[in-house]
Amino acid sequence: MNVTKDKAVRSKISYFGYSTALAGLLSFGNNALAQTAVSNEQAAEPNGTVGIEEIIVTAQKKSENVQKVGIAIQAFTGDDLAERGIQSSTQLVDVTPGLALSSAGGGTESHFSIRGVTQSDYNDIVESPNAVYLDDGYMPFQGAQTFMMMDLERVEIQKGPQGTLFGRNATGGLIQFISRKPSLTEYSGYLSLEAGMLDSPTNPLRTTVEGAVGGPISDKLGFRIAAKGFKLSPFVINRYPEQLFEGPLSGDGADLGAERMLAVRGILLFKPSESFSSELTGFVLRRTMSAGLFEQEQAASVIDRNGTWVDTVVIGPNETRLSIGPGGADAGWDVQNTGIFTPGPPERPVPGGDYFGFTGIKPWVTSSSYGFDKAGHVDMEGVNLKNTWDISGAITLTSVSDYKKLSKLQTSNGGSGPTALIFPTIGNEAWSFTQELRLNGKAGNLQWQAGAFYLHTDIDANSALGIGLANPQISLSTLASQKTNSYSIFAQGDWSFADKWKLILGGRYTQEKKRSLVTQTSFLRPTELYYPRTITDPGYIATIGPLPGGLPFAGRSDDGLWAMKAQINYSPTNDMLLYAGVNRGVKAGGFNSPLAGGLPIPASLLSYKPEVIWAFEGGVKSSWFDNRLQANLSIFHYDYRDYQAFLFAGVGGIVLNRDSKTNGGELSIKAVPARGLNITAGVSYTDAKVYNFPTDVTEQVVRTVRPSFTPKWRSNLDARYSHSFHNGTLTWDANWTYRSSMFFSLRNFSAVSDVGHSKFGAGISWEDQSEQLTFGLRVENLANERIKTSVFDVASVCGCVDVSYELPRVYTLSVRYNF
């Protein structure tokens, strides 16, 4: 464990799941094929024995016991997550081996990474290789992948390519959020209140209010409504303009880290007969947050004898060189972001400071030239309709229609200091529509599925780079639009060809068409928060160009893609499943939307090819000692062709195609060794490599690197003990998570990495005998560990890197009333 010794350092931290909290509180509508399942708790059976209750999942789009599915799945019920204090989808990484987060925007946005399959490109025209589904509805916007969760039936995390049944960009895996559906027989609901305090200099408050209610309107119609409100006060003190040595005043000096969120979801269930059901779900999300939360760490670029940027290192307090060249000489700087280092001032204004003299203040205290409270937002709404017909006793038809609309804006201070240097802003106006039709059937020993899927997305993902030192201030903007139409057909069959043996074969074909238009422009900035979206907006100066390959750049693609699955399952006993198979996963190619003002790139790099993954996996799922112990093991090998790898250099980046290989394994354990004692544990190992990856767009230096946001080791342990106490049940909880060292950029430079960390948590709760009233006390990040969540390397333009952190220690009091 790496606990910071400095008390001042230990009492602050940046923000993780709770400040990412809800780019889309979209866990809505329930899966009609899923059944209500109890949590991973002990259960007292009629004969008085103790065991682990089963969880029913729909990982293969049919209801099955999770222990009978030959896929590496981590499943949690909503009750289980609530008892563990897990409110944000970002916290799932603490309880799931092989799952990680790729963060951007100073904690305002996070994407999922599964077994090293990561998309570090934060541009919103890009889809994630790890799919997120909300009640069978695909989420195409990676900027809304993580959110606060509410009123869930369960969460299913499927690891490895799911190319046949979930073929839409599930090369790494997928996460399904399944809402609690209405009851047609009884009314129920709850109200939950939480108040937390962060262990940082201002001791800010974090409050959450959540509630749900539902029941029958008639014997054929039911409803359920859920709502959640969240508020986080600023927890970083902004002393701007302290240490401002040059440049104009900018921003309003607001403290940073504030966030507010409100989400509402409603579900109607109509079941006129046993053979037909219809679920209609609608949701609205509104979220605001401060400018991106970064702390500065002073750094220097390392330049080789050919002028190529080959590393970035954190500097000491006496360092005065702008960068480090051959023989230790000063190699200059690249403040104009041209990719060429040229002579600058003879030394840094202040030893150990950035190019403008800022040395930092202390953790959770900064001096930021771009301090705005409500600088960003995520607004989202959507509608989902799911109809299920039991055509006959052996065939079921399911239709899922889904519409989502997103408006997003996030901004941050590039350089994280008092000098008004650069202000990256990323915005997105998008909508999507998906339609899936599928048939499920059974004929003798064969269970089969077949269907078709359609996706349309319309995205305007614009980015702007405000130039603070310019006079007058200007904004260099990239105006990008992309339309996607994707058509798929799929089929899969599970054949029990012999006693205890099952053969699974499946395939999917996709035809995907994209049209992309990219224009780079310049605007005058009448205010610091000005964000132009089109050339008709005020302040338009000129179109920058020409872009390599034409002005503006217009791209079209038409990819034919196929995915497959072949697997064999063997069940030697009712308590054991062995499986081995191969999956082929695919993700369509796309187009880069280079940041205006970023490094110049050749025309050949404006588009990139589809990626293909061949995944070979074997595993065992087992239950022991009358189901008081479950142990699941999986081992895998990935062979990636044309992996879509993100190169970040200067102040922007692009996607390149490179080959990659991964070897790894995971172990998950659940145990009920004694009545009242529940233990869950997991460990994952991921040895992933990306080959021939360049340090910059010139590709003069290439290396074998590790994927970003991919630690080799992750582990978790949670122990809960419940016993009778004062006419109720008292539960004690202790948890531990660990991740080894990792890089935050594929370049694997020294300054964009973090050492391994352990994190501890603890809690205590009391529930009355009626199971209606619960009081709780919880402490997160007990040792106040400083854990990095992202690092952006802007050393060439400011002599620093931008770093964001997880939250510091948090104390939380909670009360919940069920009715």
Image (cartoon, rainbow, N blue to C red):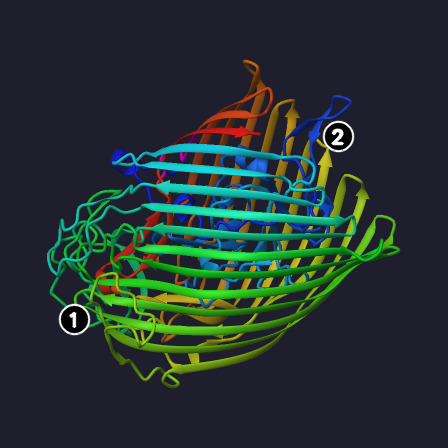
Magenta stretch, main secondary structure, is: loop
Q: Secondary structure at mark 1?
A: loop
- Identity of the residue drawn at 32% across and 84% down: 546
Query: Quadrant where the N terminus lies?
Result: top left
Q: Magenta stretch?
A: 778-785
Q: Quadrant of residue 522?
A: bottom left
Q: Quadrant of residue 818?
A: top right
Q: Secondary structure at mark 2?
A: loop
> Reading the chain from its start, which is encountered first: label 2 or label 1?
1
Tag 2: amino acid = Asp
- Identity of the residue drawn at 46% across and 56% down: 380
Name the disc covering residue 343, or none. 1
Classed neighbour count for the residue bearing mark 1: other residues with Cα under 10 Å, few (<14), some (14–19), many (≥20) = few
* Residue 781 inside the magenta-drawn segment: yes
Furthest residue to the bottom? 550
Q: In terms of depth relative to the viewer, which is nearer, 490 or 398?
A: 398
Of tags 2 and 1, the one toward the viewer is 2
Query: Quadrant where the C terminus lies?
Result: top right
Q: In terms of depth relative to the viewer, which is nearer, 160 or 264?
A: 264
Residue 361 x/y as whole percent: 19, 45
User: Looking at the picture, does residue 290 appear above or below residue 628?
Assistant: below
Q: In terms of depth relative to the viewer, which is nearer, 690 or 651?
A: 651
225 left or right of 567? left
* Residue 61 inside the magenta-drawn segment: no
Furthest residue to the top? 726
Q: Which residue is mark 2?
A: 626
Question: Can residue 394 be seen here?
Answer: yes
